[in-house]
Image (cartoon, grey):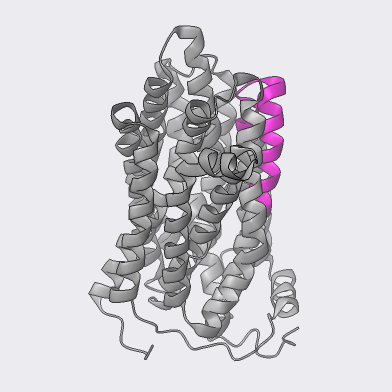
């Protein structure tokens, strides 16, 4: 696709795709516990482990491809990767409700096919959301980046909030299967918008081998880049942990209160939707904080708030009680900083012609973190109780906040994060 000047309609299309991508990703996670409970009759005894294992399986698949997909976007453009990712995700979502029927036809457990289609849904979305972040970098300069990334982040938070607060109310009216079809439709709409209304502006990467060693040396050389990768390891899974385990907590605790499972899922959706609303409202302020206080300072504040709020879930016994809103509010206030600051700083420090590759490595580390914290959290959920996964993640966030404060003490905000803005940092490195 020929290079063209970035116009406002291109940016607006990017913002809309940010929302649609997050709606898709949020809904496939949010619907999973209810789908497994209603369709596969999954019991409470192993709900945490199985739900977490399925999600970990999707993250392992993502881990294998997210870095390479970033490299492909540097080589061939962001738009083809986004379009084909959306199309694949939509097709996998269409197959998902037929898991049991397909399993019966082949004489295999329907749950095995659900694993397969769920992994496919996640892989499709993994082709999309890292390229959204890369386009945010392509469409901006260092000076304009905090605002543009904040706008895209705002739309992502809006998509997540809409998913939980509105779309998760639909299953109790029409059933969970029809909502899965809606998710597929959203993916197809995303593919159409990306193919019609986006533009390529980044220079292409000409290396035909993934420059893994060059990226590794860049990360090892720059403390601030190490910080963003560590933040990705711990904080990228925050909303995944909350979305999955809070939903399970509500659905199975409802049995003790005599509340229907669909109603419980709707209540959980409202709770998580509220948390998303807090993130949504706070993101414009995080954009200002990142611009005025600096990327590292904002990241430290975000990690501190998020970590404290997650640990606060340890004081909750009944998730249906109103005061669960207190830790949820604190987490929501911190999430904007955890979402925007490390991504902005990583984009700043990534060479222009290898931005997708560096972001691919960044997101690979995030996938590893999700795998670790979800699988461990699933075991802790069943063994120690519902708050355990939140406490584990909160402790990790506070630990990385400590490293952020160390980086501030040693380097300050400084200007070293501008070093690679001209795209030259990897130029002197061996490509493999």
Instruction: From the top left corner, tell me how far across and down residue 250 is, in percent.
Output: 48, 22
Instruction: From the top left corner, tell me how far across and down residue 298 is, in percent.
Output: 50, 54
Q: Residue furthest left?
A: 9
Query: Range of the magenta residues?
Result: 368-390
Q: Is residue 134 left or right of residue 280?
A: right
Q: What's the magenta bit mostly, secondary-structure-wise? A: helix
Q: Is residue 229 visible?
A: no
Q: Is residue 126 above or below residue 114?
A: below
- For the N terminus, give its image quadrant: bottom left
Q: What's the residue at 69%, 65% (across, down)? A: 223
Q: Nearer the viewer, residue 397 or 67?
A: 67
Instruction: From the top left corner, tell me how far across and down residue 337 is, in percent.
Output: 48, 51
Q: What's the residue at 49%, 58% (across, down)? A: 125
Q: Is residue 387 visible?
A: yes
- For the C terminus, give its image quadrant: bottom right
Q: What's the residue at 37%, 36% (across, down)? A: 273
Q: Is residue 287 above or below residue 77?
A: above
Q: Nearer the viewer, residue 278 or 410?
A: 278
| 1 in magenta | no
Q: How many marks?
A: 0
Q: Quadrant of residue 188?
A: bottom left
Q: Is residue 65 above or below residue 267?
A: below
Q: Nearer the viewer, residue 334 or 67?
A: 67
Instruction: From the top left corner, tell me how far across and down residue 132 is, in percent.
Output: 43, 66
| 383 in magenta | yes
């Amino acid at each position: 696709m020929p290079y063209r000047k970035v116009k406002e309609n291109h940016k607006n299309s990017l913002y809309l795709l940010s929302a649609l991508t997050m709606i898709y990703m949020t809904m496939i996670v949010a619907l999973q516990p209810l789908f497994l409970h209603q369709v596969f009759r999954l019991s409470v005894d192993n709900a945490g482990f199985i739900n977490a294992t399925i999600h970990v399986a999707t993250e392992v698949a993502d881990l294998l491809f997210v870095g390479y997909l970033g490299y492909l976007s540097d080589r061939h453009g962001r738009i083809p990767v986004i379009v084909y990712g959306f199309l694949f995700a939509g097709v996998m979502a269409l197959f998902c409700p037929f898991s049991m029927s397909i399993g019966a036809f082949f004489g295999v457990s329907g749950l095995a096919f659900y694993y397969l289609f769920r992994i496919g849904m996640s892989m499709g979305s993994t082709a999309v959301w890292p390229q959204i972040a890369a386009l945010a970098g392509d469409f901006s300069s260092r000076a304009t980046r905090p605002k543009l990334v904040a706008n895209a982040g705002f739309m992502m938070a809006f998509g997540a909030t809409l998913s939980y607060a509105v779309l998760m109310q639909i299953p109790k009216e029409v059933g969970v299967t029809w909502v899965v079809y809606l998710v597929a439709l959203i993916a197809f709409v995303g593919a159409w918008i990306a193919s019609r209304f986006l533009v390529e502006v980044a220079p292409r990467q000409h290396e035909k081998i993934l420059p893994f060693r060059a990226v590794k040396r860049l990360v090892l050389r720059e403390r601030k880049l190490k910080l963003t990768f560590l933040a990705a390891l711990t904080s990228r899974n925050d909303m995944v942990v909350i979305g999955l385990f809070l939903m399970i907590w509500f659905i199975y605790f409802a049995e003790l209160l005599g509340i229907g499972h669909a109603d419980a899922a709707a209540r959980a959706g409202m709770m998580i939707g509220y948390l998303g609303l807090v993130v949504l409202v706070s993101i414009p302020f995080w954009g200002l904080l990142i611009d005025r206080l600096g990327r590292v300072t904002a990241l430290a504040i975000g990690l501190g708030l998020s970590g404290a709020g997650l640990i606060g879930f340890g004081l909750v016994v009944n998730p249906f009680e109103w005061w669960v809103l207190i830790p949820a509010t604190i987490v929501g206030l911190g999430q904007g900083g955890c979402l925007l600051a490390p991504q902005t700083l990583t984009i700043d420090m990534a060479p222009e012609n290898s931005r997708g590759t560096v972001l691919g490595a960044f997101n690979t580390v995030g996938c590893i973190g999700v795998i670790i914290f979800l699988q461990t959290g699933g075991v802790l959920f069943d063994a120690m109780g519902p708050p355990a996964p939140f406490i584990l993640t909160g402790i990790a966030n506070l630990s990385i906040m400590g490293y952020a404060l160390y980086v501030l003490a040693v380097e300050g905000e400084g200007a070293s994060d501008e070093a690679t803005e001209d795209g030259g940092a990897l130029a002197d490195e061996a490509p493999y």
